[in-house]
Every structure is written in structure tokens, then in C-alpha cells.
């Protein structure tokens, strides 16, 4: 069977969570207002949220904190001014406690508590019961999302970076074989695919920086790694563009036969960049070379910049948490 589209998965999760929540609400005599847990389901079923046990706890505790703040504010003022004060207290409180996952439901429950027709009758029993009602919807929604097509942005970030690594490694191996005369010159790496993966990686990192796992991103230095990947993307495109101006058959061109060994060394440096490697020198000692000097100089410059960027990425990865061997560029075998 073909995998379901993300939109269909999201719709099924929302429908199933709503069905289970409504069934629990109708079966239980404790839940007096069914729309409280159903509204919580709608807010919690978020395709961009990382669904973990910590996130679930943040949702429940954030909602309870929002109800408590709303009740305390209600004792001194009412109406829209009370809503404003409640939001001014709830948002920094949840950020301080690290419960941003419950911000949406906490704000919603504050609005409902302070704007009900007879909010002056608000008491501890009402706050506790409605918080329990909302928590039921939160728990059902989180369990549904964890059991059906769970998504973890951190895993997706790592998998996406490994895909970019693999594509570069494969292209470098093909270019090395071309420089050795073992195969025809490969087509350039798809710029659209490379750019799309890089943009998707940046979007996932930006989303996660606003979530509860942002400290893991700081530990992995993802902000620096994204900047390095942008540099690699730029210089890689320029490097392949310049390689396309070389003869297709290096071995068959006597005038550029000496360039093949140097180009092979250059590609191997990109596969396994080392800090001890000196700058690339493609300019021949004699004047028998027929290739334009400007082209060779440009190749040298782009190669050296690309190697330094890959070396920076290597150092950045080594200084972070342990990672798998597949997450870096390895020498071609």
C-alpha cells in the first residue's frame, strides 16, 4: 500500500482523537461541557509539534497553570482587562517553567474562564473540573498522535542532514572516478533537490528552536551548522559549474592529462578534508597547458573555500554529542 499523505494522516488523527474524546465525555458524568476537551484536541493535534512524554506533560501542566492564573486574576478584576492581565502573567510564566507546549490551551482556557456569562461565580471547583476536562482532550490527542504516524523533528533533522551528506559523497565518488578515467563525467548534482533539502532542514531547525527541545539544538550547534551548510551549498554549486567547463575526457586530452591527477587529489581532499592539507595548485609549471588560467584559478579558489567549509563542518560535528559514522563525509573506498 502507498503511504498516506500528510494531510490525510492529520485528518485521521484529528477525527480519531475527537471520536475517542467525545466517547469519554459522553460516558463520564464528570465532564459537563464536551466542547472543552474537544477544543483541546483541536489545539493539540499539531502536525509540526514534537510529540514526546515531556511535551505531553508540558501541555497538561501549562493548561492547569493557565486556569490557576485566570482564577487568581478573576478575584481582583473582570472582563477584557482581566484577560489582558491573565495573558501577561501566563505567557512569561510558561516560558520560565519550560511549558510552552501548553501555551495555546492555557490562553484558550483563560479566555473561556474570564469571559463566561457568569464569571463572577467562578470558584475552585469550576477551575478544577474544567482543567480536568481540558486535560482529558490533551491526553487523548497526544496518545493518538504518538500511536498513529508519530513524528519527531529531531530525528527528521538528522535524517535530512544524512541525506545531504550521502548525496555529496555519492557525487564526489562519481567525480573521482571521472578524473581517473573510469567513467564519463557525471551530471551535476541536482541544485533544486539540494536547495529543497537545505530549506527543509532550515525550516525544521527554526521550528524546533521555538519548541521545548531547543537546548538540544544548542548542544548540537545547529545554528552554526546551518550557516556552514549554506556556505557549502554556495561553493558546491560554483565548483561543479567550473568543473563543467573542463574537457569531458581528461585522459584523452594530452594538454590536460597532468590535470587529472591534481583533480583527483582535489576531490579526495573534499571527501576527507584534513587541516594539514595545503591549498590546491592547478596551475602547471610549464606553459603547455591550454586551459584558461582564469578557469584554473577559479577552480583553485572554489575548491579551497569548499574544503575549508567542509572542514569547519567536520570540526563542528566532532565537538557536539556523539553521532553515527554515517553523518559525516567518509573517504571513498
Image: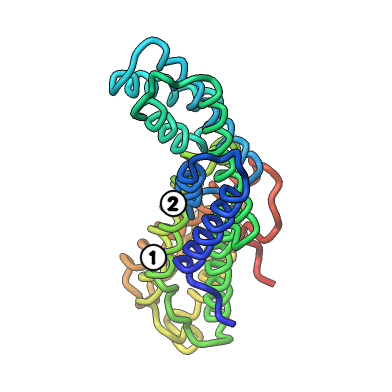
**N-terminal-most mark, 2 or 1:** 2
Q: Residue at x 56, y 62 (%)?
A: 165
Q: Is residue 276 visible?
A: no
- Which residue has dot 1 on it? 237
Give the percent coordinates (x, y) of residue 98.
Answer: 55, 29
The quadrant the C terminus occupies is bottom right
Task: Find the residue positioned furthest to the top.
Answer: 76
When the figure is inspected, residue 154 is found, relative to residue 283, above or below; the finding is: above
Given residues 196 and 300, the one toward you in this image is 196
The quadrant the N terminus occupies is bottom right
Given residues 20 and 285, the one toward you in this image is 20
Q: Residue at x 57, y 73 (%)?
A: 170
Q: Residue at x 59, y 66 (%)?
A: 268
Q: Quadrant of residue 216?
A: top right
Q: Is residue 202 visible?
A: yes
Give the percent coordinates (x, y) of residue 35.
Answer: 45, 45
Give the percent coordinates (x, y) of residue 184.
Answer: 50, 87
Q: How many residues crowd around disc 1 within 10 Å: few (fewer than 14), some, or many (20 or more)?
A: some
**Mark 1 secondary-structure assignment:** helix
Task: Find the residue positioned furthest to the left.
Answer: 80
- Which residue has dot 2 on it? 202
Amino acid at each position: 500500500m502507498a503511504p498516506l499523505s500528510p494531510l490525510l494522516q492529520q485528518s485521521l488523527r484529528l477525527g480519531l482523537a475527537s471520536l475517542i474524546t467525545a466517547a469519554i465525555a459522553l460516558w463520564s458524568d464528570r465532564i459537563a461541557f464536551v466542547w472543552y476537551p474537544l477544543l483541546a484536541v483541536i489545539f493539540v493535534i499539531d502536525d509540526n509539534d514534537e510529540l514526546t512524554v515531556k511535551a505531553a506533560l508540558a501541555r497538561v501542566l501549562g493548561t492547569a497553570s493557565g486556569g490557576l492564573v485566570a482564577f487568581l486574576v478573576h478575584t481582583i478584576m473582570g472582563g477584557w482587562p482581566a484577560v489582558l492581565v491573565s495573558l501577561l502573567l501566563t505567557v512569561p510564566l510558561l516560558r520560565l517553567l519550560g511549558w510552552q507546549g501548553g501555551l495555546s490551551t492555557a490562553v484558550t482556557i483563560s479566555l473561556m474562564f474570564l469571559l463566561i456569562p457568569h464569571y463572577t461565580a467562578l470558584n475552585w471547583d469550576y477551575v478544577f473540573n474544567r482543567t480536568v476536562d481540558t486535560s482529558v482532550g490533551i491526553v487523548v490527542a497526544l496518545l493518538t498522535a504518538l500511536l498513529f504516524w508519530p513524528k519527531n523533528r529531531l530525528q527528521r533533522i538528522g535524517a535530512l542532514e544524512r541525506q545531504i551528506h550521502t548525496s555529496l559523497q555519492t557525487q564526489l565518488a562519481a567525480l573521482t572516478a571521472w578524473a581517473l578515467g573510469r567513467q564519463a563525467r557525471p551530471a551535476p548534482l541536482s541544485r533544486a533537490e539540494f536547495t529543497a533539502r537545505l530549506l527543509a532542514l532550515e525550516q525544521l531547525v527554526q521550528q524546533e528552536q521555538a519548541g521545548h527541545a531547543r537546548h538540544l539544538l544548542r548542544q548540537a550547534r545547529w545554528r552554526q551548522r546551518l550557516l556552514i551548510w549554506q556556505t557549502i551549498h554556495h561553493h558546491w554549486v560554483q565548483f561543479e559549474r567550473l568543473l563543467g567547463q573542463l574537457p569531458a575526457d581528461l585522459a584523452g586530452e594530452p594538454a590536460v592529462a597532468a590535470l587529472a591527477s591534481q583533480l583527483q587529489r582535489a576531490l579526495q581532499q573534499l571527501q576527507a578534508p584534513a587541516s594539514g592539507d595545503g591549498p590546491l595548485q592547478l596551475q602547471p609549471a610549464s606553459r603547455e597547458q591550454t586551459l584558461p588560467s582564469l578557469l584554473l584559478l577559479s577552480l583553485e579558489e572554489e575548491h579551497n573555500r569548499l574544503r575549508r567549509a567542509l572542514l569547519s563542518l567536520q570540526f563542528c560535528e566532532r565537538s557536539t554529542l556523539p553521532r553515527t559514522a554515517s553523518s559525516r563525509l567518509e573517504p571513498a573506498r
